[in-house]
Amino acid sequence: MAKKAMIEREKKRQKLVEKYAAQRATLKEIINDEAKPMEERFRATLKLAKLPRNSSATRLHNRCQLTGRPHGYYRKLKVSRIALRELGSSGQAPGLVKSSW
């Protein structure tokens, strides 16, 4: 089980990403538009830099929803490999059969 602080930190980052997503997108659009004057693009760059760092989507890290484990994460199922194995062993993951011999 991951530390509760790490799980809460990821939740906080997710909220910030959702809150600032539209604002970041419009600023990036201005910055990448070469038809706009250089001064306006520079101002947009400064505004983008003033936004919280954790509002960037690249700072998010996938974590298992059951245990909070950051490694061995299956995106499609949103659980770690260890949690998936436990679910398979207990018969709670439909269509998954854990092999044993």
Image (cartoon, rainbow, N blue to C red):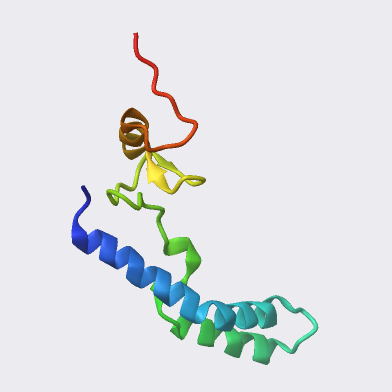
Measured along the vertical axis of the image, is residue 43 above or below residue 19? below
Could you tell whether 66 is left or right of 42 in the image?
Answer: left
In the image, what residue occupies the spot 41% across and 74% down? Answer: 15
Residue 57 x, y percent position in the rendering: 49, 66
Residue nearest the observer in this picture, 10 or 26: 10
In the image, what residue occupies the spot 34% across and 67% down? Answer: 11
In the image, what residue occupies the spot 80% across and 83% down? Answer: 35
Residue 13 x, y percent position in the rendering: 38, 70
Could you tell whether 60 is left or right of 3 in the image?
Answer: right
Residue 45 x, y percent position in the rendering: 57, 82
Pick out the residue farthest to the top. Answer: 101
In the image, what residue occupies the spot 31% across and 50% down? Answer: 66
Measured along the vertical axis of the image, is residue 94 above or below residue 10? above
Residue nearest the observer in this picture, 37 or 22: 22
Measured along the vertical axis of the image, is residue 53 above or below residue 35? above
Residue 44 x, y percent position in the rendering: 59, 86
Quadrant containing the C terminus is top left
Q: Quadrant of residue 9?
A: bottom left
Could you tell whether 50 is left or right of 43 in the image?
Answer: left
Measured along the vertical axis of the image, is residue 86 above or below residue 17? above
Pick out the residue farthest to the right. Answer: 35
